[in-house]
Amino acid sequence: MSTATLDLEKVGAFAQQVGALLAGGATTAMMVVGDRTGLYAALAASGPVTSAQLAGATGTAERYVREWLAQQAAVGILSYDPADQTFTLPPEHAAVLASDDSPASMIGAAPQISGLHRRTDQLVEAFRSGEGIAWGDQDPTTFEGAERFFRVGYRNSLVAEWIPALDGVHEKLQAGARVLDIGTGHGAPLLLLAEAYPNSQFVGYDVHPASVDTARQRAAEAGVSDRVRFEVNFCQGYPDRDVDVVMFFDAFHDLGDPVGAATHARRSLAADGTLVLVEPRAGDDLASTLATVPVAALGYAASTFLCTANSLSQPVGRALGALAGEAALREVLSEAGYRTIRRAAENDFNMVLEARP
Ligand SMILES: C[S@@+](CC[C@H](N)C(=O)[O-])C[C@H]1O[C@@H](n2cnc3c(N)ncnc32)[C@H](O)[C@@H]1O
């Protein structure tokens, strides 16, 4: 290609943009290191620290820590004071990086992004063959990342905002309802519900045995095993009938046959039961999603590697994509025989669709 016709200023500006993207990719790996070694938590708990102090506090090797600190300062996560060679994690940054318990936490997404990098070769092969990749064949950090990252939004919104926004569901859960969670993964939202509604009974189904094992462990740790059960099952295989609420948390668009799954859910629901889809917030077409969803770049990457790939690994392979949008989801629910469908709630990341048979 001749460079004569190129606007070199634009080339330079775009090269800088690409440089920032590459730095972001590298920083994700550095974030995982900071998370795993407790460096962020230690920085959050201390004032300004030198590399030696931070290494001492975390039991890590100073020479590595010094290099990590320099990178984190270069990318703007830490501030650096050259006078005494100390590094500071501002409290606003600690709120996002230092603990999963913060309502602003995003650090749980970092291992998930690292996991995508470890599956690049498989995805390239899938691009060539058109074959799918099952969720269970992803890197294990994917399962950890999904649990940790999604749980933040569920903890912020599920019990306080989403359940009360559904028609009559809070009352049923208080009195004692039967609830299913399909594609439950590590079960984070179901455990939040079980803690909030001790009179109800909850069952989480997932096709991935290792995730179900982890979910059972989480239920035991949370002390709610008396009312929560996790079982390995396909979204069209569970036997339950007369269920009050069937929920899908960030899982419906992952399914090969979402119409089949929603139809099976409808048959398992009581006549006055409710289907709830918690799905990524997106516009109804690409242009509106690009214009209105700040995390679209992340969402489409996860969708390419995980959601679309999983759907293509299953019968039908409808491959809605993670950012399918409300109109596409409504179409699926209508095909599955739901008559009343409405958007009941949303937050920065998710929208909540409520459907009735
Ligand atoms: C993105 S994860 C969401 C996990 C969990 N609901 C959450 O929000 O943390 C999607 C889950 O759906 C499960 N899944 C995919 N296809 C499934 C199917 N056909 N039947 C049941 N579960 C399925 C995957 O194994 C995975 O655990």
Image (cartoon, grey):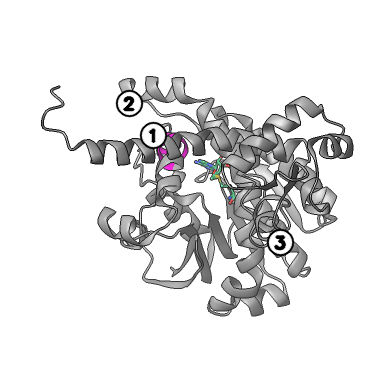
Q: Quadrant of residue 85?
A: top right
Q: Is residue 66 visible?
A: yes
Magenta-drawn stretch contains 279 = no
Magenta-highlighted stretch: main secondary structure? helix
Magenta residues (range): 303-311
The residue identified by callout 3 is 192
68 left or right of 239 in image:
right
**Relative to 308, does residue 267 appear above or below in the rendering?**
below
**Relative to 289, does residue 146 appear above or below in the rendering?**
above
Q: x, y percentage for residue 2?
A: 13, 23
Picture quarter with the N terminus: top left
211 left or right of 39 in image:
left
Neighbour tally class for label 1: few under 14, some 14-19, many 20 plus, Cα within 10 Å: many
66 left or right of 292 in image:
right
- Badge 2 amino acid: Gly
Residue name at image x 58 percent, y 38 percent? 112
Residues at badges 3 and 1 in contact (C-beta under 8 Å)? Answer: no
Of pointers 2 and 3, the one earlier in the residue sequence:
2
Magenta-drawn stretch contains 309 = yes
Residue 130, numbered circle = 2
Residues at badges 2 and 1 in contact (C-beta under 8 Å)? Answer: yes
Q: CA distance from mark 3 to mark 1?
A: 31 Å
Of pointers 3 and 1, the one earlier in the residue sequence:
3
Q: Nearer the viewer, residue 203 or 34?
A: 34
Q: CA distance from mark 2 to mark 1?
A: 8 Å
Neighbour tally class for label 2: few under 14, some 14-19, many 20 plus, Cα within 10 Å: few
Q: Quadrant of residue 356?
A: bottom left
The residue identified by callout 1 is 312
**Relative to 124, does residue 292 appear above or below in the rendering?**
below
Label 2 beta carbon less than 8 Å to ligand 1:
no
Picture quarter with the C terminus: bottom left
Q: Secondary structure at mark 2?
A: loop
